[in-house]
Amino acid sequence: MPSSLRKPSILCSLGAALVIGCIYLWLQRSSGPADDPSVPDPDPRLADLGKAPDWSALKQYDGVLSKDEFESALKDIYLLGPNRHFNINEEGVKVASTISQSVPRVDFAQGKNRSPPPRYWRPASELPPAPEGQPLNGVRIAIDPGHIGGEWARMEERWYQIDETRPVTEGDMTLLTAKLLAPGLESLGATVTLVRSSRNPVTELRPGDLQNYAGRLLSGAPEEKIVSLSERMFYRTAEIRARASLVNNTIRPDIVLCLHFNAEDWGPQPDKPRFSPRNHFHIILHGAYLDSEIAHEDERFELMHKIFQGTHEEEAALAGVLASSFLEATGLPAYLYSIGRPTKRVGPALWARNLLANRLYQCPVLFFEPYVMNNQEVYERIQSGDYEGKREVAGSIKKSIYREYRDAILTGLKTYYESRRASE
């Protein structure tokens, strides 16, 4: 073969190999985890997936609270340890930051004068009188069915199953309860929105989108630990942050009802769970920041919104009535946290904790934790599914566990708004 013909053939072969190599490298890169533009870079000064605060937003709270009111809230509800991050004097409060050099001071109210707190939610006392039989008229309520369920239930560790019986999946149970609750609230006049209405995540992120972030947090760790962390960050962090964006920017409710079912430790094998003799109820309110949590600048920023909007006052008043309703309707004992847990007791069956949803949703949040899913009686009630009326379950006549849950909330909210709304 003439050399003039052989040379182009060699070049063509090299070119083809180069193209194939580029395609291979591109496929290798595209098949692995990649940085999502919506995922921030890790910063030890921020909570997981947190973003640097816009401190200028705090100036809207000038003149809302006095020094004593701010300090009381900080000490009595929100901090478990000493104050290390809020510079307080007679004029106002300034939050410590190393991210920004221009954090404004929030000026305290002086004397009896108060500016109304800017907020999208309304306490019951600010609502107009309600029509007869519609005590929730005009109240905007978001129902947040806890967890995701469906195909994600095992990853969430909110799943167990005994033999071939109905799987116990918390995300599916909370969604069923939410769909039963919504019409009942609407019949009392409320405007109701479900934060999650299907067995799909609200966030568009998936665990693979978070592997690089998790890998930077666990530099040098085995791959399985990085994958595990990316999964937890998907359903515990990215999902809640997506729901918070929906709550604060779109729904803008007066209250959020976070529906959950509780559980005791059922062991490492969800197909061979341990049953617990305990069964109980409590509601979680926002508060009780650990020192490691308040060290995050975004958490300090979010706390300032909670304090100046007076969220706790409405939240605690609502929760007190709802807790009474639940305890009476279910006969469950009030749950007691063990000594040393990062909580503050607010009242019977009421505990303050710094949960992500309670912190990010900028309105009163009631985080319900009734029933122990791996209690024998509760398990039997779950196996019975939903039904109208009453039937014999676990040795006594009972409502469906989902309707008992629903009715306790309806009774409590009806009682609260009837007593708190302005009269004609």
Image: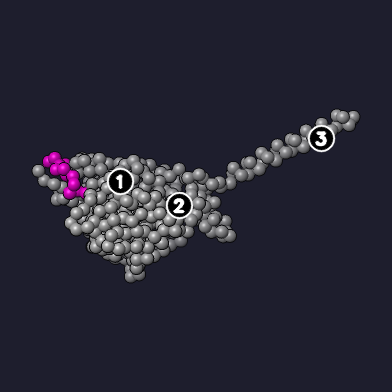
Mark 1–mark 3 Cα distance, whole angstroms, equals 67 Å
Of circles 2 and 1, which is in front? 2
Of circles 2 and 3, which is in front? 2
* Residue name at image x 16 percent, y 43 percent: 128
Q: Quadrant of residue 320?
A: bottom left
Q: Residues within 10 Å of mark 3 (few under 14, many from 20)?
A: few
Q: Tell me the element at label 3.
A: helix
Marked residue nearer the N-terminal end (1 or 3): 3
For disc 2, the marked residue is 49
Magenta stretch, overall SS? loop
For disc 3, the marked residue is 10
Marked residue nearer the N-terminal end (2 or 3): 3
Q: Is residue 371 left or right of residue 267?
A: left
Q: Is residue 124 magenta?
A: yes
* Residue name at image x 37 percent, y 65 percent: 84
Q: Quadrant of residue 103?
A: bottom left
Q: Amino acid at mark 2?
A: Leu
